[in-house]
Amino acid sequence: MRRDRFGHHTGVPIERSWQAGTSPELLLAAQLQAALDQAGCAGARATLVLSDDWFRLGIVTPPLTPVAGWIFQTSAGTRSRKPCLSAALPVHVHSALQDILARNRLRGVQLMPHCLAAWTRWQGELDRDDWFGTVHDGRLMLISRANGKMIALMQQSLTEDDMRMPDRLDRPVRTASDRSGWPLPPRIVLCGEVPQPWTVASPGRLVCIPLREKNLPAGSLAVALAQAGIAA
């Protein structure tokens, strides 16, 4: 997806289908190059948002200890010592993508997982004890928080039945609260494909608040990732 110098979305989102048969990182790089060729955006500023599946995610307390074979990024500033969201991308995947980005002379490139892009975009909308998460491609990613600090991260697969069950979100949240000893959150704030039944208020149920961007085109899961990058 492209936007002009005023930040407005321009043109039609470019999508390319995934073809099996080669190593995932090489295929990802090839698809990225094909999309950049089609977009004609050499020399532009860019944010590349990848599905969380490419990363190892967790909540860590800085400073981080380097691990061979992995490139780390976090949601925290360089001097922060608070628990933060950490995302580790394999070096060979990072290198393959950086080669493509450099070849196309893209400027100010940010390469991040969906969850980090979403956190960057929406953290200012959260109260201190809100839990935050994303729903994307049949996966729930949820960060528990208390007193403005991150506690833990959980990820769960969702079935079609899960998406239709009003109380499906309550169960993992109550379990996590019981295990950690932290109180239940006043609100669970989610972005992405938030199931409508989860957001219906009911006595005894936890409050789920959906976050949605305005003035961005609707589309597929791939477009949803691109939207996260534009918003962040």
Image (cartoon, rainbow, N blue to C red):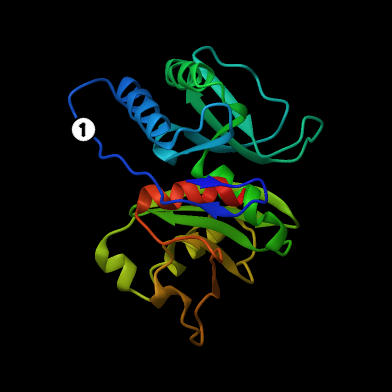
Q: For the view shown, which residue lies furthest in the bottom direction?
A: 203
- 186 to 220, vertically: above or below: below
x and y, in percent, of residue 201 in the image: 50, 84
Q: How many marks?
A: 1
Q: Dot 1: what SS?
A: loop
Quadrant of res 38: top left
Q: For the view shown, which residue lies furthest in the right direction?
A: 79
Q: Nearer the viewer, residue 85 or 146?
A: 85
Quadrant of res 111: top right
Residue 219 falls left or right of residue 153: left
Q: For the view shown, which residue lies furthest in the left direction?
A: 21
x and y, in percent, of residue 204 in the image: 51, 83
Q: Nearer the viewer, residue 179 or 80?
A: 80
x and y, in percent, of residue 90 in the image: 46, 21
Which residue is found at the position 57% from the left and 35% from the top? 46
Which residue is found at the position 49% from the left and 14% from the top? 69
Amino acid under disc 1: Gln
Which residue is found at the position 63% from the left and 52% from the top? 121
Q: For the view shown, which residue lies furthest in the top direction?
A: 68
x and y, in percent, of residue 97 in the image: 46, 22
Which residue, given by chain and number where applicable, does mark 1 sit on?
A: 19
Quadrant of res 17: top left
Residue 22 falls left or right of residue 219: left
Which residue is found at the position 43% from the left and 37% from the top? 39
Residue 139 falls left or right of residue 129: left
Badge 1: few (under 14), some or many (20 or more) residues near its Cα, within 10 Å?
few
- 104 to 17, vertically: above or below: above
